Amino acid sequence: MKTAVPPNLYSFTRAQIVDLLAGWGYSTFHVARVWEMLYKNRLRADLRADLQADLALRTIAPMPTAVISLNSSDGLTRKYLLRLPDGETVETVLMYFKGRATACVSSQVGCAMGCVFCATGQMGFRRHLSAGEIVTQALFVDALLRREGSHLRNVVFMGMGEPLHNYDATLTAVSILTDQKGLSLAPKHITISTVGLVPAIRRLADDPQPVMLAISLHGATDAERQALVPLAVRWPLDDLIAACHYYIKKRRRRIFFEWALIAGENDTPEHAHTLGELLAGMDAHVNLIPLNPTGGYDGTPTDATTVAAFQNILTRCNLPSTVRQRRGIDIAAGCGQLAINN
Ligand code: SAH
Ligand code: SF4
């Protein structure tokens, strides 16, 4: 018979640890100590002996171990293959920008959404990550940054998997990451990127935690989007755009739209105009990402001149945009390149 694995302390919010310890007969005084042990010093020795024993017997608190670490040649991107307790692995990326560092975390092993140009989609879905498995990716990166005299301030859910398909674990991880007695990240420094799960976008708009939202769009007509993003058959653009308007109205925050530029597929002036019309009047910002190579898709990235022309049209449509700096391509750590090939 399979024995049940004890719960992972890193999946608990502070309020849940209050309940857990209360159930074992400990006062709230001990909660602060446990939380400090998890998020500040990792020292169990500071806890009372009976509490140490209870935690050791009834819970686990595993940190992932890095089985592969890769540094990009420009030194600005690092990718880690992290092994989880059950032997599955995920990739986590640390990106250095001017004056800040960002952790790109995974929310699932693989992904069920099947976007044709994405290496994670190409490997299929293996399992959801728990909140603790998401939180400890950020803690892993924070520990690296602390050794360099800084600490983690930005997290993007742009690694492997679709975070809104794993909604509860993702939002529990957000509340742990933003806990002011822990890592204390600002919600506006956390971005959730989604392929466009419409009901989950509406749910996120109503969630008390005001994180930033990015939508992977890639096509501005249903037919074009569906050819790249199979999920778009389930949630057509009308529904998606209505959910975006709802989000902006509720949150009063702009939405970022991601657009992988693929030569000849979605990068012509006409595509740019259609995109401009689709997002007209919306508080939106478009991130243009020239396609990164993946094993299962033979499209090619848009060249620099065509990217500039595309961006000019968006500007004329009053739609702000940024061309994503290509980074980490030499270690396959770019957008859409994360996968495990075992
Ligand atoms: N599942 C979420 C989170 C992953 S974020 C989502 O799709 O939004 C990864 C981002 O990289 C997404 O915007 C995705 O559409 C984009 N992407 C995937 N494959 C890519 C590729 N080959 N080149 C450029 N961007 C890609
Ligand atoms: Fe999944 Fe996002 Fe990749 Fe699509 S782009 S397959 S949703 S990880």
Image (cartoon, grey):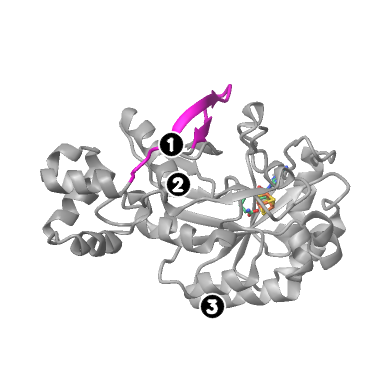
Confirm or deny contact between disc 1 and disc 3 (CB under 8 A): no
Task: Look at 77% across and 39% down and name the residue there.
Answer: 304
Q: Nearer the viewer, residue 50 or 39?
A: 50
Going by the image, does 61 lie left or right of 84?
Answer: left
The nearer-to-camera label among 1 and 3 is 1
Residue, disc 1: 64
Depth check: give the residue in front, 61 or 42: 61
Instruction: Measure the alpha-carbon separation of dots 2 and 3.
Output: 32 Å
Q: Label 3: how many residues lie within 10 Å, few (<14), some (14-19) or many (20+)?
A: few
- Density class for disc 1 (Cα within 10 Å; few <14, some 14-19, many ≥20) is some
Q: Which residues are magenta?
A: 60-83
Q: Nearer the viewer, residue 57 or 286?
A: 57
Q: Residue visible at 81% across and 63% down?
A: 273
Looking at the rendered structure, the number of numbered marks drawn on it comes to 3
Secondary element at image label 2: helix
The answer to whether residue 77 is magenta is yes
Residue type at mark 2 is Glu
Q: State the CA–CA distance, disc 1 to disc 2.
A: 8 Å
Q: Secondary structure at mark 1?
A: loop
Residue on which the image places disc 3: 249
Does the CB distance between marks 1 and 2 fall below 8 Å? yes
In the visual, does 190 lie left or right of 109? left
- Nearest to N terminus: mark 1 or mark 3: 1
- For image coordinates 67% across by 33% down, the residue present is 341
Viewer-nearest of labels 2 and 3?
Answer: 2
Relative to 195, is 50 on the left or the right?
A: left
The residue labelled by disc 2 is 133
Q: Does ligand 1 reach within 8 Å of label 1's beta carbon?
A: no
| x, y percent for residue 179 | 31, 57
**What amino acid type should be assigned to the residue bearing mark 3?**
Lys
Q: Quadrant of residue 279?
A: bottom right
